[in-house]
C-alpha cells in the first residue's frame, strides 16, 4: 500500500491505519523531516510495521496494490 501526502493530517491517519493491515506501507511526501518523524511515531505505536519512505510517488507505484492519495495539491500532477 502507498500513502501519497503521508505527512498531512489525513495522510498520517491513513498511514497509521494501513500499517496495521498491510504487509508494507510506502509513505510519500516531499518533506523528508516530516516523513522521518512520522515513521518514528508509527514505529513507536506499531513496532513491527514495515515502512518505506519516498519523496516521489512514481518510484514504487507499479508495485502497489492500493494507493491512498491524501494531498492538497489541487491542480498538480500526483503521478507521472
Image (tube, rainbow, N blue to C red):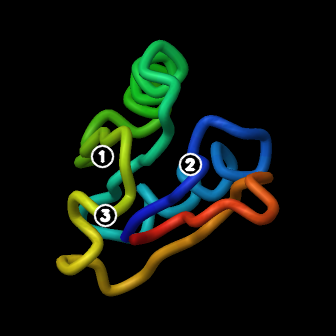
Q: Say which residue appears at 39% left-offset and 71% top-offset.
A: 80
- The answer to which quarter of the image holds residue 32 is top left
Reply above or below: 56 against 55.
below
Mark 1 or mark 2: which comes first in sequence?
2
What kind of element bears circle 2?
helix
Discs 1, 2 touching: Cβ within 8 Å: no
Mark 2 or mark 3: which comes first in sequence?
2
Q: Say which residue appears at 35% left-offset and 70% top-offset.
A: 22
Reply above or below: 11 against 78.
above
Q: Position of residue 36 (x, y in %)?
A: 40, 20
Which residue in the structure is indicated by mark 3? 58
Q: CA distance from mark 1 to mark 2?
A: 10 Å
Reply above or below: 77 against 48.
below
What kind of element bears circle 1?
loop
Q: Position of residue 74 (x, y in %)?
A: 81, 61
Which residue in the structure is indicated by mark 2? 16
Q: Say which residue appears at 28% left-offset and 45% top-offset.
A: 51
How many numbered marks does the figure carry? 3
The one nearer the camera, 66 or 17, is 66
Identify the mark at residue 49; answer none if there is no mark.
Answer: 1
Left or right: 43 as drawn, with respect to 71: left
- The answer to which quarter of the image holds residue 43 is top left
The one nearer the camera, 17 or 55, is 55
Nearer to us: label 2 or label 3: 3
Discs 1, 3 touching: Cβ within 8 Å: no
What kind of element bears circle 3?
helix
Q: Residues within 10 Å of mark 3 (few under 14, many from 20)?
A: few
Taking the view exactly as shown, the residue that stands out farthest to the bottom is 65
Q: Position of residue 18 (x, y in %)?
A: 49, 63
Q: Residues within 10 Å of mark 2 (few under 14, many from 20)?
A: many
Mark 1 or mark 3: which comes first in sequence?
1
Amino acid at each position: 500500500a502507498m500513502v501519497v501526502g503521508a505527512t498531512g493530517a489525513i495522510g498520517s491517519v491513513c498511514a497509521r491505519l494501513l500499517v496495521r493491515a498491510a504487509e508494507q506501507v510506502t509513505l510519500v511526501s516531499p518533506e523528508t523531516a516530516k516523513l522521518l518523524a512520522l515513521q518514528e511515531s508509527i514505529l513507536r505505536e506499531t513496532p513491527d510495521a514495515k515502512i518505506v519512505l519516498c519523496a516521489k510517488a512514481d518510484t514504487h507505484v507499479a508495485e502497489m496494490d492500493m494507493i491512498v492519495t491524501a494531498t492538497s495539491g489541487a491542480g498538480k500532477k500526483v503521478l507521472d
